[in-house]
Amino acid sequence: MADTNPKAAQAEQTIKHHMLAAAGIGLVPLPWVELAALAGLQLNLLRSLAGIYGVEFSSQIGKSAIGALVGSDLSVSLSTGLGILAKGLPGIGWAVGAASGALLGAASTYALGKVFVQHFESGNTFLTFDPDKVKAYYAQQYEQGKEEVRKNFTGLKP
């Protein structure tokens, strides 16, 4: 059955584009540049989704929401951190770090987008966002995001 909600369809496309861009950012050889670029991309995702749903956007509130949600999942934070650190190892370390960075950054971006689509679809704004209430949904969408990345980039493993 086709999605009859044009906002939801536009949001899905926006999430997919940002997810694919996040996978590309994971290939950046400089770990701190990668983190900054990913944070900027995720902030842009929230700005884009807010525009689709007519929600007022503030960079400061967006940054806080991303930090509270993404930073709250210790397994995501540790996995991403270890992947980034692996890039500093000579030889195979960069390849492992790049592959995991691409996968984990894209999955995190996907999950973040899905959480905010659900939030905005419910008529909420950034001011009503409570990361504690969506942690489980974020974790579920993070796993789904890894599968979505694998569909688009065969050969990537966590």
Image: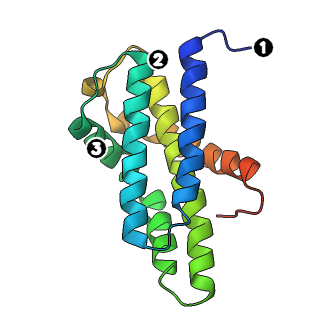
Residue 137 location (% of width, % of height):
51, 37
| Callout 2 crowding tier (Cα within 10 Å): few <14, some 14–19, many ≥20 | few
Residue to which mark 2 is pinned: 121
Question: How far apart are labels 3 and 1 at the CA level?
Answer: 36 Å
Q: Which mark is residue 1?
A: 1
**Mark 3 residue element:** helix
Visual colour scheme: rainbow
Q: Is residue 60 above or below residue 90?
A: above
Quadrant in which residue 81 is drawn: bottom left
| Callout 1 crowding tier (Cα within 10 Å): few <14, some 14–19, many ≥20 | few
> Which badge, 3 or 2, comes first in the chain's sequence?
3
Which residue appears at 67% of the width and 50% of the height?
A: 149
Residue to which mark 3 is pinned: 63
Question: Does residue 123 appear to the left or right of 5 in the view shown?
Answer: left
Mark 3 residue type: Lys
The C terminus is located in which quarter? bottom right
**Mark 1 residue element:** loop
**Mark 2 residue element:** helix
Mark 1 residue type: Met
